């Protein structure tokens, strides 16, 4: 059975699908891609690790008829990755399961496997449906992902919480030390609901979904979800459980407000981070008289650094400590020219917001303070 396909398009689809594959599988067949050529010439490439199943679609250039087989993912990708853009002629011997791929300068052969033992996907066919612009989904994931946890006990913290309201959607993520709350009002689902998107799935989606896509459809139940675009479908297990009340830890009013140039603040933090304590990453912020001082030190290695920046601040002097790395990550996620740092006493959480944001969006990032030894 012979079919032809674009080398770059095939390599792109395989790369996306490979993100689902696990390093160790309980079923050897899951080390393979399932490739299916339909009667109409549509190719589907499936990758799975039992909890997640990713299906990508690619039209063939030519085909003789339907064929279905499994091939080791790593071997196929290594064989294809150095081939420049051109049509590939792939011949599958359905009796010997040999695959022969011919290109302009040569060919290679692989042994495939029967697809009969490959586990069937478990799509969600009935449930709640969330339709969301692709750009909004990717933005919400990018902003919330860094705050998610890797907790072996509180599994609900290991994902992004989709808090669905009739007139908006809220993306939330927290690990107990940092928190993100992103309210998006240009999406009006018209119903109340929620689900927790696993961290690993979020990483895959942010890499495979293009912002050029129009809308994304997510159908979900209590424990599973299916997400669909024009080029791919993904079925996956959701994190079950009750997400913590993230609003309860957000201070209603922090009295000390400073407006800081985001790029200058980020650069200063990166310079100071070199000399911060390697285990705690503590950076001390001192605010007074339209200025902010950043200080970090590591007594073990006798290193220290400080930076002084101008900012808009006209309140009582305050000193507070935070994780330098978390502040750097926040500055990298926000895209406004200036940020607002909202503080209270050194025992209460600090808030970071963009100084300018769209009227349909409200983004808040929270950091728990760290103890500063005087």
Image: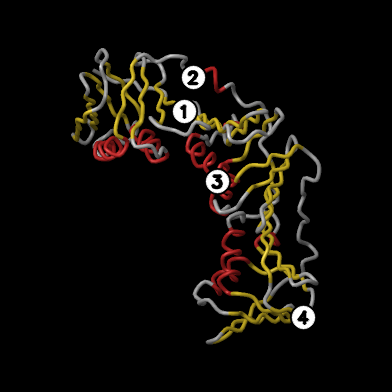
Q: CA distance from mark 4 to mark 2?
A: 61 Å
Q: Residue at x 41, y 37 (%)?
A: 334
Q: Quadrant of the C terminus?
A: top left
Residue 216 location in percent, x, y?
Answer: 65, 47
Mark 4 / mark 2, whichever is N-terminal: 4
Dot 4 alpha-carbon crowd within 10 angstroms: few under 14, some 14 to 19, many 20 or more: few
Q: Badge 1 is on which residue?
A: 364
Q: How many marks?
A: 4
178 relative to 229, above or below:
above
Bin the neighbour count of mark 2 within 10 Å (Cα to Cα): few under 14, some 14-19, many 20 and up.
some
Give left or right: position of 106 versus 57: left
x and y percent of residue 273 in the render?
28, 37
Q: Position of residue 205 (x, y in %)?
A: 58, 49
Dot 1 alpha-carbon crowd within 10 angstroms: few under 14, some 14 to 19, many 20 or more: some
Way the structure is coloured: secondary structure
Q: Is residue 105 left or right of 267 when viewed as pictured?
A: right
**Among the two numbered marks 4 and 3 on one chain, the one whose residue lies closer to the N terminus:** 4
**44 w.r.t. 150: above or below:** below
For residue 64, the mark is 4
Q: Residue at x 55, y 46 (%)?
A: 135
* First of labels 3, 1 by sequence position: 3
Tags 1 and 4 touching, CB below 8 Å: no
User: What x and y, as percent, mark residue 192?
Assistant: 70, 27
Q: Check if mark 2's residue and mark 1's residue have beta carbons within 8 Å.
A: yes
- Residue that numbered label 3 is attached to: 135
**First-in-chain label (3 vs 2):** 3
The disc placed on residue 250 is 2
Foreground tag (4 vs 3)? 3
Q: Which secondary structure lies at badge 3?
A: helix
Q: Nearer the viewer, mark 3 or mark 1?
A: 3
């Amino acid at each position: 059975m012979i079919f032809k396909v674009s080398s770059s398009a095939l390599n792109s689809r395989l790369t996306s699908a490979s993100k689902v594959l696990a390093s160790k599988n309980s079923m050897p067949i899951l080390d393979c891609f399932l490739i299916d050529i339909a009667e109409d010439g549509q190719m589907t490439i499936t990758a799975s690790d039992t909890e997640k199943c990713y299906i990508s679609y690619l039209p063939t250039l030519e085909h003789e008829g339907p064929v279905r087989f499994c091939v080791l993912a790593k071997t196929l990708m290594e064989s294809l990755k150095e081939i420049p853009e051109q049509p590939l002629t792939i011949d599958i011997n359905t009796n010997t399961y040999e695959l022969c791929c011919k290109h302009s300068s040569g060919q290679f052969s692989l042994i495939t496997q029967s697809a009969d033992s490959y586990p069937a996907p478990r799509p969600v066919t009935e449930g709640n449906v969330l339709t969301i612009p692709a750009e909004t989904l990717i933005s919400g994931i990018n902003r919330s992902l860094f705050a998610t946890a890797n907790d072996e006990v509180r599994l609900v913290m290991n994902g992004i919480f989709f808090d669905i309201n009739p007139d908006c959607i809220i993306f939330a993520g927290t690990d107990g030390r940092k928190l993100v709350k992103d309210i998006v009002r240009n999406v009006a689902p018209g119903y109340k609901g929620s689900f927790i998107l696993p961290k690993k799935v979020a990483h895959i989606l942010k890499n495979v979904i293009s912002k050029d896509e129009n809308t994304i459809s997510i159908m979900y139940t209590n424990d599973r979800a299916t997400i669909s675009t024009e080029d791919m479908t993904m079925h996956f297990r959701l994190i079950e459980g009750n997400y913590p009340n993230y609003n309860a830890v957000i201070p209603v009013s922090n009295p000390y407000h400073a407006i800081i140039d985001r790029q200058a603040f980020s650069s200063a933090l990166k310079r100071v981070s070199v000399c911060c304590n390697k285990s705690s990453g503590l950076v001390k912020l001192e605010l007074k008289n339209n200025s902010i001082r950043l200080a970090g030190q590591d007594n073990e290695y006798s290193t220290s650094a400080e930076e002084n920046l101008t900012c808009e601040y006209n309140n009582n002097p305050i000193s507070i400590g935070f994780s330098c790395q978390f502040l750097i990550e926040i500055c990298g996620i926000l895209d406004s020219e200036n940020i607002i740092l909202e503080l209270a006493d050194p025992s209460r959480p600090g808030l970071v917001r963009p100084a300018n944001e769209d009227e349909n969006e409200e983004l808040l990032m929270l950091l728990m303070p760290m103890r500063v030894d005087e």
